Image: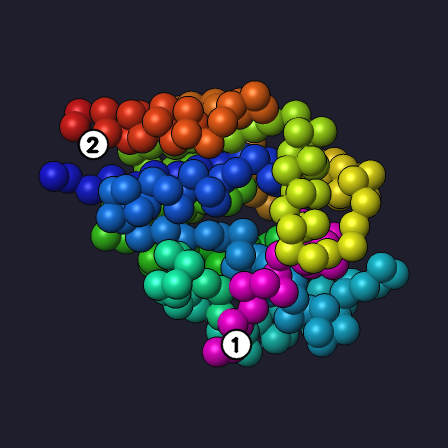
Amino acid sequence: MKKITIAIDGFSSTGKSTIAKQLANALEYIYVDTGAMYRAVTLYALRKGFIDAENFSINDLVADLNLIDLTFVYNENVGFAEMYLNAENVEKEIRTMNVSNYVSKVAAVPEVRYQLVKQQQKMGKDKGIVMDGRDIGTVVFPDAELKLFMTASPEKRAMRRYKELIDNGDDVKYEEVLRNVQNRDYIDSHREDSPLRQATDAIAFDNSDMGLKEQFDRIMNLAQRTINT
């Protein structure tokens, strides 16, 4: 059976990672969460004091890029690869609201994107990969055989994210999460370098009112049809 590249783009909290993990497991493909990579760089910047509510020392972050080692390590207990920053498992810490508040600004830095896109393209050079993010189908793998663009209403996405954070023990308010979602949408869509946009050959997929099983079944069918074409 031939292997393909599956690129999943879309807005924050549309369930890109969930469907990407499911597809990768079902197809026995490699899964890469590019959002986790940008979150890990953001966590590094926060820890170093390069970014806060008042300032963003872009030059300092760029100067440190060669000191940031990002790797995915498979955890059989959870069934997917977790994000490691300089040999430290940061999977839980990168999912916090604090990181979410700054990740779009960090991801908009051209030097950061250039560095991470190179790594992502290297990971997928042999196909058999499912990768999700903001610019996978437009920049990282413009020739991907299957491209999906995930979307849902901001309110639905904010509620999903809110429930996830509450389940993780975070003390957040829905209104705060909604503002974060809307702010990230704007930054991701308006940045100069690789803005979030639907590739011309991507399939739009609105899951506002769709259950996980229906979503998986429909997208898995698309993947199988593409593989068998």
Decide if residue 127 is in sight here: no
Per the model, the C-alpha gap separating discs 2 and 1 is 36 Å
Q: Going 70% across and 36% down the picture, which residue do you hit?
A: 158
* Kind of residue indicated by mark 2: Ile
Residue 81 is situated, as x and y percent measured from the top left of the image, at: 40, 61
Helix, strand or loop under label 1: strand
Q: Point out the stretch of residues depicted in magenta.
A: 85-106
Left/right placement of residue 196 relative to residue 23 reads: right
Q: Is residue 22 above or below residue 31?
A: above
Asked if the residue under mark 1 is in contact with the one under mark 2, i.e. CB atoms within 8 Å, the reply is: no
Instruction: Using the image as rendered, state which of residue 12 and residue 189 is in the foreground.
Output: 12
Q: Going 48% across and 78% down the picture, which residue do you hit?
A: 87
Residue 180 is situated, as x and y percent measured from the top left of the image, at: 75, 43
Q: Is residue 97 above or below residue 60?
A: above
- Quarter holding the C terminus is top left
Left/right placement of residue 46 relative to residue 208 reads: right
Q: Going 48% across and 23% down the picture, which residue do you hit?
A: 204
- Number of the label disc, if any, that sits on residue 88: 1
Decide if residue 122 is in sight here: yes
Camera-near label (2 vs 1) is 1
* Kind of residue indicated by mark 1: Glu
Q: Which residue is outermost to the right?
A: 54
Residue 50 is situated, as x and y percent measured from the top left of the image, at: 75, 70
Instruction: Using the image as rendered, state which of residue 66 and residue 23 is in the foreground.
Output: 23
Helix, strand or loop under label 2: helix
Write down the residue under mark 2.
Answer: 227
Quadrant of the image occupied by residue 222:
top left
| Label 2 vs 1, first from the N-terminus | 1
